[in-house]
Amino acid sequence: MTSKQYLEHGIKIAHDLRAHLAELDMLREVATATGAIRYDTDKVIHSVTEARYERPIIRVVDLENMVKAEIRSLLEEHEEIRKTIGAIEDADVQNVIRMRYLGDLDVDIIAYRLKISRRTVMRRLELGYVEVAKITGYPAPIRQRLPAEERHGDAKRIMREYYGEEQ
């Protein structure tokens, strides 16, 4: 896992939390929607000690408890990611990382909101990956593009090899 994947896990956690909360709402609706007995069509047996809706409600409560436990676990993981982002020293980099991985915003939207270029957002994200790698111990992702000094150094080396050492 790289530092970028670690941060992307925060987005997944947020989506999972939303899904679990929606499931919890649905389970609560099911638990409260008990049907009434229709005496004209339902046969009422007086020897039964439990109501028709008792078992479904117990099942819903058990499922609700499972979902709550999963939500607690996800919140702990999310808080860990939030603390890691909060430990980034550069406020501009921290802000971009926070918007991207806690706010789940696209790079273009971040650039628009901060009134900076898309390229600056990408540069700050890459700096953030390096900072998160230092904090967490996960490796930073491999850079897709080399820094200018390294690109120009390669070009100079190739030119020297082609034309000889005279230049």
Image: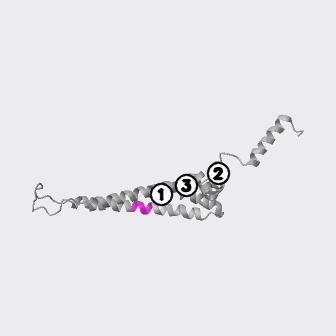
Q: Which residue is mark 3?
A: 105
Residue 148 coordinates in the image, percent (x, y)? 74, 48
For the residues carrying marks 3 and 1, which lies nearer the camera in this image?
3
Q: Amino acid at mark 2?
A: Arg
Q: Is residue 159 left or right of residue 123?
A: right
Frontmost residue, 89 versus 33: 33
Disc 3/disc 2 C-alpha distance (Å)? 13 Å
SS category of the residue bearing label 2: helix
Disc 2/disc 1 C-alpha distance (Å)? 24 Å
Disc 3/disc 1 C-alpha distance (Å)? 12 Å
Which mark sits nearer the N-terminus, 3 or 2?
3
Is residue 58 inside the magenta stretch? Answer: no
Frontmost residue, 117 versus 68: 117
Q: Residue furthest right?
A: 166
Crowding at dot 1, Cα within 10 Å, few <14 / some 14-19 / many 20+, comes out as some
Q: Amino acid at mark 3?
A: Leu
SS category of the residue bearing label 1: helix
Residue 66 coordinates in the image, percent (x, y)? 35, 60
Q: Is residue 20 left or right of residue 146?
A: left
Instruction: Give the magenta range.
Output: 69-73
Crowding at dot 2, Cα within 10 Å, few <14 / some 14-19 / many 20+, comes out as some
Q: Which residue is mark 2?
A: 118
9, above or below 152, in the image? below
Q: Which residue is mark 1?
A: 14
Crowding at dot 3, Cα within 10 Å, few <14 / some 14-19 / many 20+, comes out as some
Which mark sits nearer the N-terminus, 2 or 1?
1
Q: Which residue: 62% across, 63% down?
A: 88
SS category of the residue bearing label 3: loop
Residue 134 visible at all:
no
